[in-house]
Image (tube, grey):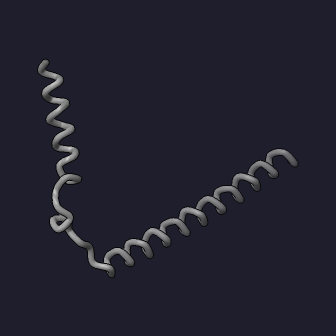
Amino acid sequence: MKNLFKKRKRQKNFLKPLITNDKQFKSSDVNILLNRVKYNEKLELRKKIYFVITCLVGVLVFAYISFE
């Protein structure tokens, strides 16, 4: 019985923000959101560049090993 009460309490705490008024939700500044989007785009571009460089190095190493 003890676990059942804990589970209900967890569910109640989880659903609490969904039940409250919309006025209580915090609003975010548009500039902060735009900066976050730009930062995420930069990170994605960096990841793509690192991936391409890693693939090129891998292909060059494979070619060097196989043709030697």
Rendering coords of residue 11 (x, y %):
21, 38
Rendering coords of residue 15 (x, y %):
22, 46
Count of numbered tags:
0
Please identify the quadrant where the N terminus is shown.
top left
Front-lying residue, 14 or 48: 14
Residue 17 vs 48, above or below: the answer is above
Horizontal relation, residue 39 to residue 45: left or right: left
Residue 54 vs 49, above or below: the answer is above
Quarter assignment of residue 12: top left
- Which residue shows up at 80% across the image and 51% down it? 64
Front-lying residue, 3 or 56: 3
- Which residue shows up at 20% across the image and 68% down it? 26
- Which residue shows up at 33% across the image and 81% down it? 31
Front-lying residue, 67 or 47: 47
Residue 5 vs 47, above or below: the answer is above
Horizontal relation, residue 27 to residue 66: left or right: left
Residue that extends furthest to the right in the rendered view of this protein: 67
Quarter assignment of residue 30: bottom left
Rendering coords of residue 68 (x, y %):
86, 47
- Which residue shows up at 54% across the image and 62% down it? 47
Horizontal relation, residue 21 to residue 60: left or right: left
Residue that extends furthest to the top in the rendered view of this protein: 1
